[in-house]
Amino acid sequence: MAAKRKALVLGGFTGLAATAQADVLEEAGWAIRRLGRSDLDFQAANAFGKLEKLLDALEPDLLVNGAAYTQVDAAEDNPDAADFLNRAVPAALGRMVKSRPSCILLHYSSDFVFSGKKRSPYTTDDPTGPLNVYGKSKAAGEEALLSLGLANCLVVRTAWLFGPGRGNFVTTMLDLCRKNSSINVVHDQTGSPTYTEDLARCCLKLVEAEAHGLFHVVDAGEATWCELADEAVRLARLECIIRPVTSAEFPRRAARPTYSVLDCSSFERVTGSKPRPWPQALRDYIYKNTAPGGDEPDGKRDADEA
């Protein structure tokens, strides 16, 4: 019998993307080792040496980087922290797998690397132009990894994630609607809502296809934040009015792209499959993770992990 493939998942306890990735890999028969911040704190002086020793000991087939600085507004006041986690750490991981060609590195990036000036879905060939510190740090992380020219590295841009494991936009909207008869939601930002379980399954397909380089992976279709909230509330059968407002009426510390829909053509060409529409994915998430009566299941956590 063939030995189980092994994966080391950074952020695999609390990160939205990484938790789902670990779960999907485990379901597919992989042996999983999850690391949280308590296991590996990249701010510690010996963090990278500790990780190298762990890679030597475990010899994983896949290293999933779900550790990231994800607080978009806070990044404006903490650019060094964002740069360290979103650029320096991925660059270090890239150098580690460069000397371990049998280990694939899967790194998540973001739609926030784009300016939002387009009005058609962004492809992997489109130039980046981030509007905020967070987006700049994610773009720098991509560049650091792709410049290494690795045949064992996947950089996957995704967007607008919702899924179990920690709070997200969908759970926030449902919580607000349980407490209020109406809420205001921004209607002039458009993106690609994505279920983390779908993201994880698509990333596994890329790994199995022995793909490398830059890919976009999001659920199909597009929506505004207002449309996403409205559909979530409808599916959860809550009595709450969603009132559209402009971004100017809801000021944030960091500027957001008004349009950041991602084109998944490169993923589709390599894997021969297409992501499903986001409303279908949202329905599955709501039905699986919202108990009768509208209560969220226990176990939500918070962390700075993607």
Image (cartoon, rainbow, N blue to C red):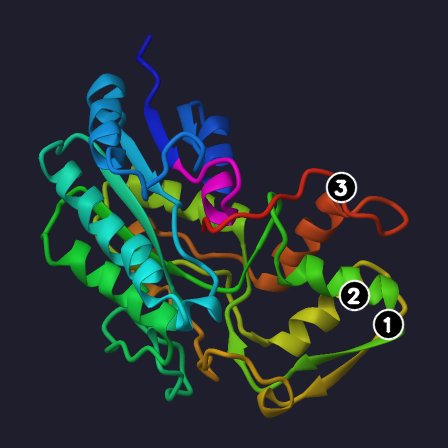
SS of the residue at dot 2? Answer: helix
Q: Which of marks 3 and 2 is nearer the N terminus?
A: 2
Q: Which residue is drawn at 75% across and 48% down?
A: 287
Check disc 2 and report the residue beneath it.
Answer: 176
Q: Nearer the viewer, residue 19 or 43?
A: 43
Among the 4 quarters of the image, the one containing residue 179? bottom right
Residue that appears at 30% across and 63% down: 80
- Number of other residues with Cα within 10 Å of mark 2, as a class: few under 14, some 14 to 19, many 20 or more: some
Query: Residue 115, relative to residue 264: is it above or below?
Result: below
The local crowd at label 3, few if under 14, some if 14 to 19, many if 20 or more residues have their Cα within 10 Å, is few
Name the residue type under label 1.
Answer: Cys
Q: How far apart are marks 1 and 3 (CA)?
A: 21 Å
Q: Callout 2, which amino acid?
A: Leu
Q: Is residue 22 magenta?
A: no
* CB atoms of marks 2 and 1 within 8 Å: yes
Would residue 122 be seen by someone viewing this image from the given angle?
Answer: yes
**Residue to which mark 3 is pinned:** 297
Stretch of the chain drawn in magenta = 10-19
Please name whichever residue, 304 or 242, is drawn nearer the observer in this view of the structure.
Answer: 304
**Picture coordinates of residue 201 (x, y %)?**
46, 43
Which label sits on residue 240? 1
Residue 113 image offset from top left, x and y in percent: 33, 72
- Going from the N terminus, do you reach mark 1 or mark 3 first? 1
Q: Is 150 positioned to the left or the right of 65 in the image?
A: left
